[in-house]
Image (spheres, grey):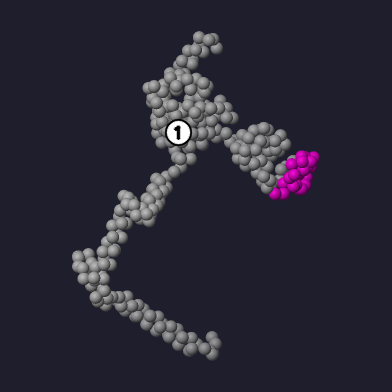
Amino acid sequence: MPKEDRGKWKADYMIKLVQLLDEYPKCFIVKADHVGSKQMQQIRISLRGQGIVLMGKNTIMRKAIRGHIEHNPNVEALLPHLKGNVGLVFCKGDLLDVRKLLMDNKVAAPAKAGALAPVDVTVPAQNTGLGPEKTSFFQALSIATKISRGTIEILSDVHLVKFGEKVGASESTLLTMLKIFPFSYGLAIDNVYDNGSVFHPSILDITDDQLHKKFLLGVRNIASLSLQIGYPTQASAPHSLVNGFKNLLALACATDIEFKEAEQAKAFIADPSAFVAAAPAPAAEEAPKEEAKEAKKEESESESDDDMGFGLFD
C-alpha cells in the first residue's frame, strides 16, 4: 500500500473510531486469538443490528483515543486495556444479548502443539479404531489400553492436558488421531466498558435479586453494629424505636402508668383467662373426629373376629 493511501487509511480509521466512541456508550474489549477471517466475517454478520466489531492496531487506537479525551474524558478508561490482539465490539442494546451472540459464534479447533490449553482435556474410555501397531504410542503417554477385536481400546478416562498447560506434540498427535477437537475459539470478552467504567464480564451475571439480598445483608450488619455500640443510624432507628417501646410497655405493666398502647397487655396480665376462652374450640372440633376413628376401628376389629376360624367353603 502506498504511503499516501496508508496515511489516508489511518486517518479514516481514527475518524471511524472516534465516531463509534461518541455514538455507542458501551463496548466489549475482546481478544481475537486464533480467530480466522471467515469466522470473523460470520461474527460480524450475526451482530448486524446489535453491535459493530472494530479491530485494528493498538497504537492507532490509543492515538485516536488520546486525541479524543478532551471531547469525551470517559474514553480514557479504555487505554490501559488495549494490549495484545484485542478489538472493540460496540453496542447500544442489552450487553447480555450481545455477549450471548459472541459466545455462540465459537468454532471447534484441534489442540495444536505449543498452544496453552483454555480448558482441561480428557480422553474418554473408548475403542479408538487404531491398529495394534500404535500400542507403543499409548504406552509412551502412560495410557492403559488393550487389544479388542484387532483394535486398541482405552480402558479408562485419561486427563490428558490440564488448564493453562502447554499442549505437547504427543498429546496433539493423539487428539488428532482420535479426531477430538477439544478447544473452541472465538472473540473472548476480556473487559466491559460502560460510560467510562471498565469492569470484568462476570459482573454481568449479577442479578437484581442478588443485589437486593446483598443490600439487605449490609443493612442488617449496620443495624446490628449500631445497636451494639449505641450509635444511632438510619438502619438502626426502627429497631431502637421498637426496643424503646418494649421498655415502656414493660415499665407500664410493672407500675400504675397508663397509656393506650399498654391497655391490652395490662388487661392480659389482670385476667389471662379472658384471652384463652376461644382456645378449646379446635379441641372440640377434633373430638368428633377421634370418636369416629375409634368407632371405625371397633367395627374393623369385630369384623375380623367374626371371620376367624372359617374357611371359604365351610
Kindly state the secondary structure of the residue where label 1 is placed: strand
Which residue: 38% across, 24% down?
72
In this figure, which residue is indicated by the disc labeled 1? 198
| Figure quadrant of residue 229 | bottom left
Q: Is residue 142 magenta?
A: yes
Amino acid tagged 1: Val
Which residue: 26% across, 67% down?
251
Looking at the rendering, the stretch of residues picked out in magenta corresponds to 131-156
Whole-percent x and y of residue 197? 42, 33
Which residue: 23% across, 70% down?
255
Q: Is residue 301 magenta?
A: no
**Closer to us: 265 or 185:** 265
For residue 273, say whether it is visible. yes
Q: Is residue 162 left or right of residue 131?
A: left
Whole-percent x and y of residue 64? 45, 20
Whole-percent x and y of residue 71? 37, 22
Whole-percent x and y of residue 205? 46, 42
